[in-house]
Image (cartoon, rainbow, N blue to C red):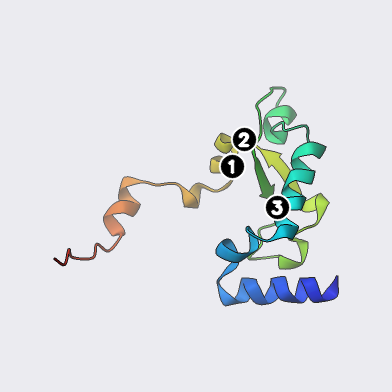
Amino acid sequence: MVSRLACLSAVVHSGQLPDNFYKTGAWVCKRLEILERDNYECQRCKGAGGYTKGNVVHHIKHLEDRPDLALDDDNLMTVCEACHNILHPERLWTPEASKRRQITPERW
């Protein structure tokens, strides 16, 4: 377990986390385990008295901050896409972000 955590920490600090971690067998298995544990229900909507099908497994404490909790059941919860967008507003597309993005000139 310690070597797995050391590897995860190295992946986080190398900046390659999204491409590598979410494709590992450990994450794929853990994701399915959490979805089944939560009955594929969004836990935020359920907490508010509603029901929404959940298909995203969210890290409560972000991987960048706590790579040691990457596969910890208590740090993972099922959420719907709408709730995940609320939890991560920085990932949403906005016109302002689009304007700030540097456009590479077309080269033909």
Q: Which residue is mark 1?
A: 84
Q: Across the whole image, how many numbered discs are drawn on residues?
A: 3
* Residue at horizontal 66 percent and vertical 58 percent from the top: 62
Instruction: Answer above or below: position of 45 versus 19.
Output: above
Q: Which residue is mark 3?
A: 28
State which quadrant residue 70 falls in.
bottom right
- The amino acid beneath tag 2 is Cys
Which numbered dot is residue 63? none
Neighbourhood count class around disc 1 (C-alpha, 10 Å): few under 14, some 14–19, many 20 upward? some
Instruction: Evaluate if marks 3 and 1 touch, with contact meaning CB atoms under 8 Å apart.
Output: no
- The amino acid beneath tag 3 is Val
Look at the numbered disc 2 and give the secondary structure of its residue.
loop
Which numbered dot is residue 80? 2
Q: Is residue 69 left or right of residue 102?
A: right
At which x and y percent is residue 1?
A: 86, 70
* Residue at horizontal 81 percent and vertical 76 percent from the top: 3
Q: How far is the residue under mark 3 from the one under mark 1?
A: 18 Å
Q: Nearer the viewer, residue 75 or 38?
A: 38
* Residue at horizontal 69 percent and vertical 34 percent from the top: 44
Query: Which residue reaches farthest top?
Result: 50
